[in-house]
Amino acid sequence: MKLQRVLQYAQLLLSQSINEGEIAVDATAGNGHDTLFLAQLVGESGHVYSFDIQQEAIDSTINRLEEHGLRDRTSAILDGHQNVANYVTKEVAGAVFNLGYLPGANHDVITKGETTIQAIDSLLQILKINGMIVLVIYHGHVGGKEERDAVIDFVSQLPQKYVHVLRYEFINQKNDPPFIIALEKVKQFPKA
Ligand SMILES: C[S@@+](CC[C@H](N)C(=O)[O-])C[C@H]1O[C@@H](n2cnc3c(N)ncnc32)[C@H](O)[C@@H]1O
């Protein structure tokens, strides 16, 4: 068996945790590739909530979904993923983040450690047991290393009784290759 490439592995993890009829979240819609993948996983009876702070990304995501006839099972939301709890109140089976900037757009608009962590924290509360949050961490751009370090610091301290945290990374590749952090919820957090 060959080692799974980073993006393939992210999809494998998501496909193992999300079933038809469930709810999934694309925290960084971008050009909609992950939203489309999630929409296929949740099927006709499921739903995908997709977030981005750029209108351009929301439009591109909607176009991709329409091309595939999957618009009805998705909500494309022009707002930051840190506000996920304002939109998603039901149990979530899986979520994905692609950190960094929108390919082909302004490189100044990037995901940031503070808001990414807020979104992870909110999603962990509403994630089903055995559900998965998959982060694809791009860190080669300006600001990328700060976000990477903040996110790693946060997830490293999550209590293992409630969340299993995996890092999947090719360590001999050049030029800051992306890597995965996957969070599997194993037990409900105590109510605050
Ligand atoms: C690497 S791109 C995502 C690529 C996407 N998964 C795709 O399939 O094309 C990161 C995206 O995150 C968006 N973003 C930045 N900060 C955000 C935030 N706080 N909430 C939601 N999206 C955000 C950017 O606008 C950008 O489109």
Image (cartoon, rainbow, N blue to C red):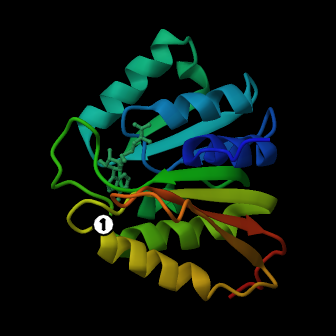
Residue 144, above or below 72: below
Give left or right: position of 93 versus 106.
right
- The picture quadrant where one finds residue 22 is top right
Q: Position of residue 137 (x, y in %)?
A: 45, 60
The residue at 53%/20% (across/down) is 71
Q: Position of residue 87 (x, y in %)?
A: 52, 51
Q: Position of residue 9 (x, y in %)?
A: 66, 46
Q: Secondary structure at mark 1?
A: helix
Q: Nearer the viewer, residue 72 or 14?
A: 14
Residue 55, above or below 17: above
Kind of residue indicated by mark 1: Gly
- The picture quadrant where one finds residue 160 is bottom right
- The picture quadrant where one finds residue 166 is bottom right
The residue at 49%/20% (across/down) is 65
Q: Position of residue 131 (x, y in %)?
A: 76, 57
User: Badge 1 is on which residue?
Assistant: 144
Q: Quadrant of the N terminus?
A: top right
Q: Nearer the viewer, residue 108 or 121?
A: 108
Residue 180, above or below 117: above
How crowded pointer 1 is (Cα within 10 Å; few <14, some 14-19, many 20+) is rated as: many
Give left or right: position of 189 versus 174.
right
The residue at 72%/32% (across/down) is 42
Q: Quadrant of the C terminus?
A: bottom right
